[in-house]
């Protein structure tokens, strides 16, 4: 279920407004190929992908990436 649909479905209008304001203030564009969190790191933020894709991958010894799970936005 898309995140925007979850906001509409599960939150009352005041809570939904708070989420939308928070997301708009903290929104940022991530460069293609950038890591949000690296293996072994502790995440310090909740990332919500509003457009594009994110993927979980393992770095192989020869330098290639093995995609473990894609996460489409929407």
Image (tube, rainbow, N blue to C red):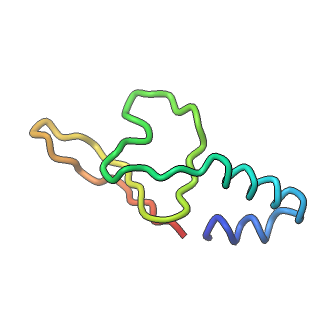
Q: Nearer the viewer, residue 66 or 19?
A: 19
Q: Is residue 32 left or right of residue 22?
A: left
The relative height of residue 54 versus residue 34 in the rendered view (above or below) is below
Image position, residue 41 (x, y; %): 44, 28
Image position, residue 51 (x, y; %): 50, 65
The relative height of residue 37 versus residue 14 in the rendered view (above or below) is above
Q: Residue at x 21, y 48 (%)?
A: 65
Q: Nearer the viewer, residue 70 or 29?
A: 29
Q: Nearer the viewer, residue 34 or 7?
A: 34
Q: Is residue 37 left or right of residue 46?
A: left
Q: Residue at x 53, y 57 (%)?
A: 49
Q: Residue at x 74, y 58 (%)?
A: 20
Q: Residue at x 72, y 49 (%)?
A: 22
Q: Is residue 38 left or right of residue 28?
A: left
The relative height of residue 41 versus residue 26 in the rendered view (above or below) is above
Q: Quadrant of the N terminus?
A: bottom right
Image position, residue 58 (x, y; %): 28, 43
């Amino acid at each position: 279920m898309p995140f925007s649909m979850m906001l509409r479905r599960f939150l009352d209008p005041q809570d939904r407004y708070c989420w939308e304001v928070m997301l708009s203030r903290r929104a940022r564009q991530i460069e293609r190929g950038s890591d949000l969190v690296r293996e072994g790191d502790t995440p310090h933020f909740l990332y919500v992908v509003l457009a594009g894709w994110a993927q979980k991958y393992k770095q192989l010894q020869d330098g290639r990436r093995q995609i473990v799970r894609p996460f489409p936005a929407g």
